[in-house]
Image (tube, helix red, strand yellow):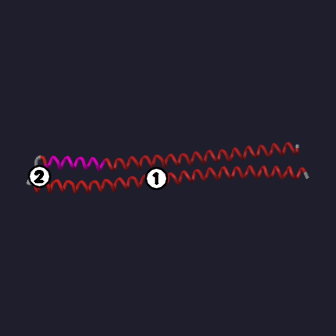
C-alpha cells in the first residue's frame, strides 16, 4: 500500500512539473502578445500623430492665406498698393507662415518617431519576455524531472 502511495506521489510530482512548464510557456506567450498589441497601438498612434500634424499644418496654411489676403485688402483700401513696405510685410508674413507650417509638420514627425521607437521597444520586450519565459519553463521541466527521477531512484533502488 505504501508503494502505491509513493508511486501516486511521484506521478503527482511529474504532473505538477508538466503543469508548471505549461503555465510558464503560456505566460511567456501572453507577455509577447501583450507587447505586440502595445507595439501595434504605438504604430497606429504614430500614424495618427502624422495625420494630425498634416491637418494642423493645412489649417495653419489656410489661416495664412486668409491673413495675407486681409493684409493685401487693407493695403489696397489704404491706397498703398503692392510696393515697398507692403511687399516686405507680405514676404515676411509668408516666410514666417511657411516656417510655422514646417514646424508643425516637424513636431508631428518627431512625435511619430518617438511612438515608433516605443513600438520597437515593445516588440523587443515581448521577444525577451517570451525567450525568458521559455527558458524558465524549460528549467522548471528539467528540475522537476531530475527531482522526480531522484525520488524514484531513492524509493526503488
Dot 2: element: loop
Mark number, residue 43: 1
User: How far is the residue under mark 1 from the one under mark 2?
Assistant: 48 Å
Residue 116 vs residue 96: left or right?
A: right
Magenta residues span 86-102
Dot 1: element: helix
Residue 85 vs residue 114: left or right?
A: left
Front of the two marks 1 and 2? 2
Q: Residue at x 58, y 51 (%)?
A: 32
Crowding at dot 2, Cα within 10 Å, few <14 / some 14-19 / many 20+, comes out as: few
40, above or below 142, in the image: below
Q: Position of residue 34 (x, y in %)?
A: 56, 53
72 vs 121, nearest the viewer: 72
Mark closest to the chain's N terminus, 1 or 2: 1
- The quarter of the rendered structure image containing the C terminus is top right
Q: Position of residue 115 (x, y in %)?
A: 45, 49
5 vs 142, nearest the viewer: 5
| Secondary structure character of the magenta stretch overall | helix
Q: Position of residue 27 (x, y in %)?
A: 63, 51
Q: How many marks overall?
A: 2
Mark number, residue 1: none
Q: Is residue 93 magenta?
A: yes
Q: Is residue 23 magenta?
A: no
Q: Which residue is mark 2?
A: 82
Which residue, as the protein is rendered here, is positioned at the far left?
79
Residue 24 vs residue 112: left or right?
A: right
Q: Residue at x 23, y 47 (%)?
A: 95
Amino acid at each position: 500500500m505504501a508503494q502505491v502511495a509513493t508511486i501516486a506521489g511521484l506521478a503527482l510530482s511529474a504532473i505538477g512539473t508538466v503543469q508548471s512548464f505549461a503555465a510558464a510557456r503560456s505566460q511567456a506567450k501572453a507577455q509577447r502578445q501583450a507587447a505586440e498589441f502595445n507595439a501595434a497601438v504605438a504604430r497606429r498612434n504614430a500614424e495618427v500623430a502624422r495625420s494630425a500634424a498634416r491637418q494642423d499644418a493645412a489649417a495653419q496654411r489656410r489661416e495664412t492665406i486668409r491673413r495675407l489676403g486681409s493684409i493685401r485688402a487693407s493695403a489696397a483700401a489704404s491706397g498703398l498698393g503692392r510696393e515697398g513696405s507692403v511687399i516686405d510685410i507680405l514676404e515676411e508674413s509668408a516666410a514666417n507662415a511657411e516656417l510655422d507650417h514646417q514646424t508643425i509638420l516637424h513636431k508631428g514627425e518627431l512625435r511619430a518617431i518617438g511612438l515608433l521607437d516605443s513600438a520597437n521597444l515593445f516588440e523587443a520586450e515581448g521577444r525577451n519576455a517570451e525567450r525568458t519565459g521559455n527558458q524558465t519553463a524549460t528549467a522548471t521541466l528539467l528540475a522537476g524531472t531530475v527531482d522526480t527521477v531522484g525520488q524514484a531512484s531513492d524509493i526503488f533502488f
